[in-house]
Image: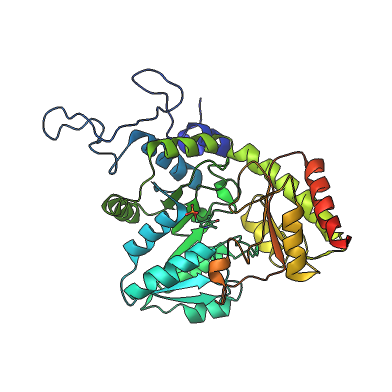
Amino acid sequence: MNRRAGEQGFNTRAIHAGQEPDPATGAVIPPLHLTTTYKQDGVGGLRGGYEYSRSGNPTRTALQEALAALEQGSTGLAFASGLAAEDTLLRTVCRPGDQIVLGGDAYGGTFRLISTVLEPWGVSYRPVDLNDLDAVRDAVAPETTRVVWCETPTNPLLNVADIAVLAEIAHAAGTLLVVDNTFASPYLQQPLTLGADVVVHSTTKYLGGHSDVVGGALVVADAELGELLAYHQNAMGAVNGPFDAWLVLRGIKTLGVRMDRHGQNAARIAEWLLEHPAVGDVLYPGLPQHRNHEIAAKQMSGFGGMLSFRLRGGEEAALRVCGRAELFTLAESLGGVESLIEHPHRMTHASAAGSPLEVPADLVRLSVGIEDIDDLISDLDQALGSLTER
Ligand SMILES: *Cc1c(COP(=O)(O)O)cnc(C)c1O
């Protein structure tokens, strides 16, 4: 007997959930429904509920069902970008006077959305160190805190927060725990199963996986909240197009095998960097000496492909390594099959300069791809070697 959909393993769900062969033609891959509108069989006679593609499109539906299955949620919703998903979520659940408790090194764009777009509309925020549970308890105010925003592992410092404990704290105060699961991907971590209420993704990263599509997603446990968010997805309109949905769906099919290789390569590089004389701290949750290694080992099934390291030679050394790397492409973003290197202080996290979320200038972040490990290490070797040249 075949296992029922809900009991299937992760990779089976990634390949099949929401992706039944097309009933009309048998096409094995969900068709790309490039249409804005749908013929009605008499006024109001909708086929499958489709009337207009902002409200619903079958290719997007396939992606949304796959996302919900991977995160084990009731409802998945796809958006034009990760930030579009975040904006839709926050403007759905927050009202003027509400507060967001925000992990102290959240993604720079999340911080910018909250601090420059939402704050003028009366939504305040309070940055806290999510590893300091007393500080989190103090920051969460039952009357005003609507959301505890947790990113784990964080970008770019790779801190790991205990999702189950944060869920308890949030729920005791009647607030929502939101987890940005972009770095781990649902293959390594499923926050809803640990008590989180909402999972946020930039599908631009590991879910898409090939650096060719920008997108975002929300997945929720509670069906009622799912309905409210679906209403706002349509009312606010920040949906992704069908081709973008289709690309993310294609990426998702190989998520498991990609994440395994990303993690193997990143672990090898982390160990190699530890031995390098030009390198100070290596920030990778898979290292036993990482400050949150135990929490990561408890709630993740692997440690992912992202790592950061600090240069003993300061910002100048960090900039030089970024400039010298060749196989590691100097570029923002992450989570694609190709390896990337970047300087968060001046690039991805420049918008956090001067704020409590500012990142150190001697930090270099790697998105470790799935190339051959010897080639990756050889490139880092020459880039770091350049520091001792005159
Ligand atoms: C990239 C990213 C986002 C924002 O997603 P976009 O698709 O760029 O809008 C949010 N959170 C994290 C952790 C990210 O890396």
Q: Is residue 197 left or right of residue 367?
A: left
Q: Residue at x 76, y 58 (%)?
A: 321
Residue located at (80% from left, 69% from top): 313
Query: In the displayed structure, does residue 376 sit left or right of residue 93?
Result: right
Position of residue 192 relative to residue 39, above or below, is below
Q: Residue furthest top?
A: 25
Q: How are the colours assigned in the image?
A: rainbow
Q: Is residue 171 visible?
A: no
Would you identify the image quadrant in which residue 352 lies? bottom right
Image quadrant occupied by the C terminus: bottom right
Quadrant housing residue 297? bottom right
The image position of residue 294, as x and y in percent, is: 70, 62
Q: Residue furthest front?
A: 390
Percent across and percent down for residue 375 are 80, 41
The correct choice, above or below, for 47 with respect to 175 in the image is above
Along the line of sight, the residue nearer the viewer: 349 or 267:
349
> Could you tell me how many numbered marks the image carries?
0
Residue farthest along the bottom direction in this orientation: 138
Location of residue 242 by image quarter: top left
Whole-percent x, y for residue 19 in the image: 44, 31
> Does residue 133 appear in the picture of this structure?
yes
Image position of 330 with respect to 248: above or below: below
Which one is in front, 122 or 164?
122
User: Quick check: 202 left or right of 332?
Assistant: left
x 41%, y 53%: residue: 221
The picture places residue 379, in percent across and down from the top left corner, at: 80, 47
- Identified at 63% across, 70% down, the residue is 359
